[in-house]
Amino acid sequence: MPIIVNLDVEMAKKKISLNELSERVGITPANLSILKTGKAKAIRFNTLEAICRELNCQPGDILAWDEEEEDTSIHNK
């Protein structure tokens, strides 16, 4: 997928664990882990807002677009 999730990088910069961030944001550790590993297909804006608030960062610090990445799921439909 051409969208790259850098949540793990931002979490490491702020020295915050997955469990601590999930508590602060109000989502389960399992759902946050899915997002962190780049396996999520979507994110709600209110979740993104809460993550940015807790990590004191911008959405662009967490999400990036890489035009070199090919999204094979589009080609397989």
Image (cartoon, rainbow, N blue to C red):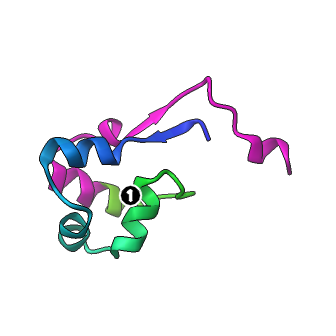
Q: Is residue 24 above or below residue 68?
A: below
Helix, strand or loop under label 1:
helix
**Measured from the top left, where is residue 64 in percent x and y?**
44, 34
Q: Amino acid at mark 1?
A: Phe
CA neighbours of label 1 inside 10 A, class few (<14), some (14 to 19), many (20+): few
Residue at the spot 13% in from the left edge and 46% down from the top edge: 14
Residue at the spot 32% in from the left edge and 73% down from the top edge: 27
**Measured from the top left, where is residue 63 in percent x and y?**
41, 40
Q: How many marks?
A: 1
Q: Is residue 34 above or below residue 53?
A: below
| Mark 1 lies on residue | 45
The reply, left or right, for residue 68 in relation to residue 60 is right
Residue at the spot 60% in from the left edge and 25% down from the top edge: 67
**Measured from the top left, where is residue 46 in percent x and y?**
33, 62
Q: What span is in magenta?
A: 49-77
The reply, left or right, for residue 3 in relation to residue 64 is right
**Measured from the top left, where is residue 34 in percent x and y?**
46, 62
